[in-house]
Image: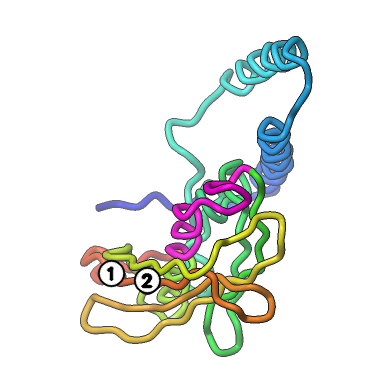
Amino acid sequence: MTTDLAPTEDADADAVLAALAVLTGRARELVDAVVLTDVPQSEIAAVAAELATLTERLRARRRTSPQPFEIGPDGVPRHAGNAVTGSANPHALPLVVQTTPERTARAELTFRPTHEGPPASVHGGISAMILDHLLGHAVAVAGVAGMTGTLTVRYLRRVPYGEPLVATAEYTRSEGRKSWSEGRIALPDGTPLVEATGLFVTPREWVENPLRG
């Protein structure tokens, strides 16, 4: 298995990525507006036509794959195109993960209406995706980055959107190339809403040829 890392950054690359982050933010706003709009049908059709034109402009020059990733100084992969954290991916929240002094992962987040599953609640698959990423971050910070082997999720209470929440995860143990971590999404007062445990496996290629930024 080979992994494409981001090329050495320069001023132009930074400027392009910054512009993409702004565009991505506008795209997220557009998605939220589509989910909640109640404008007349004629206006919906007019906006759809404008979007078709804008889409063709962006398709004028395309990469063959999403943004490459790099390995940060903490050993954690950083990927502008990531579906959970990517600054250049409209699908992402984006989730901003921090490493605490205790070397656990923590993120403050607020889900949007576009994440709805059951009425007024976040889709269970979205919660699982967030926890999968956070659990993986925790094992990476511990120095044993790997790919998800199993993810066990326990849904305790409904997860609201539009309200501040806190997600945390911590590495628990390793056996050979296997590592485990635990995490949760909770209310700010600590009330758990979703809990998860994950098993992550470090590919042999990563052991023999560690990824470097």
Place of residue 98 in the rendered image (x, y in percent of width and height, measured from the top left): 61, 73
Q: Name the residue: 63% across, 71% down.
A: 166
Q: The disc labelled 1 sits on which kind of residue?
A: Thr
Q: Is residue 106 left or right of residue 11?
A: left
Q: Is residue 195 left or right of residue 189?
A: left
**Which span of residues is magenta-colored?**
114-133
Q: Nearer the viewer, residue 105 or 160?
A: 160
Q: Name the residue: 60% across, 83% down.
A: 100
Q: Name the residue: 48% across, 70% down.
A: 156
Q: How is the image coloured?
A: rainbow
Q: Nearer the viewer, residue 208 or 143?
A: 143
Place of residue 67 in the rendered image (x, y in percent of width and height, measured from the top left): 51, 43
Q: The disc labelled 2 sits on which kind of residue?
A: Ala
Q: Residue furthest bottom?
A: 102
The reply to whether the C-beta atoms of the residues labelled 2 and 1 are less than 8 Å apart is yes
| Sequence order check, earlier mark of 2 and 1 | 2
Residue receiving disc 2: 145
Residue receiving disc 1: 202
Q: Is residue 69 left or right of residue 14?
A: left
Q: Residues within 10 Å of mark 2 (few under 14, many from 20)?
A: many
